Image (cartoon, grey):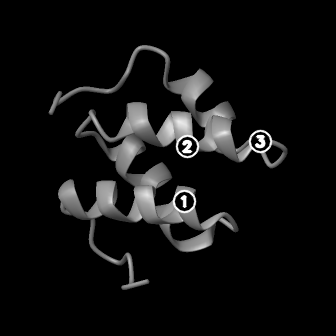
Amino acid sequence: MIKETPRNIEELKKKANNKNSWRERLSAVNVLKEYDCKQSKDILARLAINDPVFKVKETAFRAAQALGVKGTRKM
């Protein structure tokens, strides 16, 4: 795990917020899970709780758990 904010965090935020493409959101999750920073954790927690696509939600949930994020309820 990398203990810093990704250089392309703004691009990853946009991908994570793309309501038209679950694949883009999943792609963002797969990058964000490698970074142990507040912004990554916040995005992963939000997707783990709110994403409408199970695959994205599950992947974000597992990534958030691995990063020790509190407040993500069990699916």
Classify residue 49 as left or right of residue 23: left
Q: Identify residue type, mark 3.
A: Ser
- Label 1 environment density (alpha carbons within 10 Å; few <14, some 14–19, many ≥20): some
x then y, percent, for residue 17: 70, 44
Q: Nearer the viewer, mark 3 or mark 1?
A: 1
Q: Which mark, residue 9?
A: none
Q: Residue furthest top?
A: 7
Quarter assignment of residue 54? bottom right
Q: Tag 2, which secondary structure? A: helix
> To which residue does mark 2 refer?
26
Quarter occupied by the C terminus: bottom left
| Disc 2 to disc 1: CB gap under 8 Å | yes
> To which residue does mark 3 refer?
21
Q: Tag 3, which secondary structure? A: loop
How far apart are labels 2 and 3 at the CA level?
9 Å
Q: Identify residue type, mark 1.
A: Lys
> To which residue does mark 1 refer?
55
